Amino acid sequence: MSPHVTPFLALALCLGQVLHAQNGVLPKPSIRAEPASVIPRGQTVTIVCQGPAGVDTFRLEKEGKVLYPDVKSLHGTEAQAAFPVPTSEDTAGLYHCLYYNGADWSQRSEPLQLVVTEDPQTPWDDSNSSGLSTEHVSILTGVSVALLLCVFLVLIVLCCQRRKKHNLATVDRLPEKDGEMHTPTPTAGGPPDVTYAQLDHRILTQRTAQAASLQPTEPTAEFSTYAALATR
């Protein structure tokens, strides 16, 4: 063997060992479930795997088994891949993800526990919660409009009653005014006004008795005698 080849072989072996050591300490990827790790049956959960830049492919495993095809990573500041998983009775369990950088596979990520429930109403369901809030707002709006209409109707009824009472009071005062306006006044050249005065019955009786004693044949006066006095 040429003495010049030996140094190159030694350098190649050293580089191979360095690369192998670097490949053995690849950082673990991260794993998460969107929108949540607790999801009702029949919904779709998305498991997102994320790793360092330069990752080529991501793989998703369930309890050590590859049940889904590998996904090419989306390159950026950090590489990531999304795995849509329809939920069923067999979906619940532990999930891991790992990535391939073109030379070797990384270690598995921390486990992700996926829980499938039977109740479709879960706290993380943002669409459902927004629907409930919208329904509440609609109910409150309807109640507010109904209350405003009731108040408006009450005000109308009160105004009508007040106007009716005012009209009745006006009608009651009309005869008095009419009576004052239609009081007959004496016309020019007409007969003078006549004022009647009632005379005292006892005085008249005494005078009548005296007159009777003087003139027995004259008739007695009545109880009340009225004298007509002409006024100017």
Image: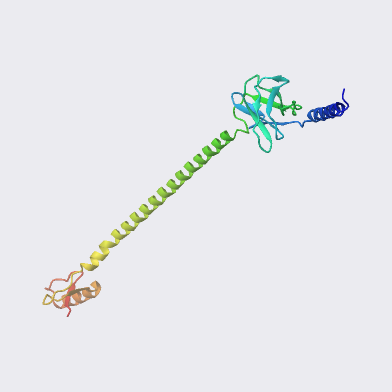
144 sits left or right of 185 in the view: right
In the rendered image, the residue lying farthest to the front is 2
Colour pattern: rainbow
- Say if 183 sits above or below 229 in the image: above
The N terminus lies in which quarter of the figure? top right
Q: Which quarter of the figure has residue 223?
A: bottom left
Residue sitting at 49 percent across and 43 percent down? Answer: 141
Residue sitting at 20 percent across and 70 percent down? Answer: 224
Work out whether residue 81 or residue 15 is closer to the camera in this orientation and state it: 15
Residue sitting at 63 percent across and 33 percent down? Answer: 124
Residue sitting at 28 percent across and 59 percent down? Answer: 171
3 sits left or right of 19 in the view: right
105 sits left or right of 213 in the view: right
The C terminus lies in which quarter of the figure? bottom left
What is the tally of numbered marks visible in this picture? 0
Residue 202 percent across, percent down from the top left:
25, 73
- Say if 131 sits above or below 189 in the image: above
Work out whether residue 50 or residue 188 is closer to the camera in this orientation and state it: 50
Q: Which quarter of the figure has residue 31?
A: top right
Residue 193 percent across, percent down from the top left:
16, 75
190 sits left or right of 26 in the view: left
- Say if 138 sits above or below 205 in the image: above
Residue 77 percent across, percent down from the top left:
68, 38
Work out whether residue 108 or residue 188 is closer to the camera in this orientation and state it: 108
Work out whether residue 155 or residue 104 is closer to the camera in this orientation and state it: 104
Residue 34 percent across, percent down from the top left:
64, 32
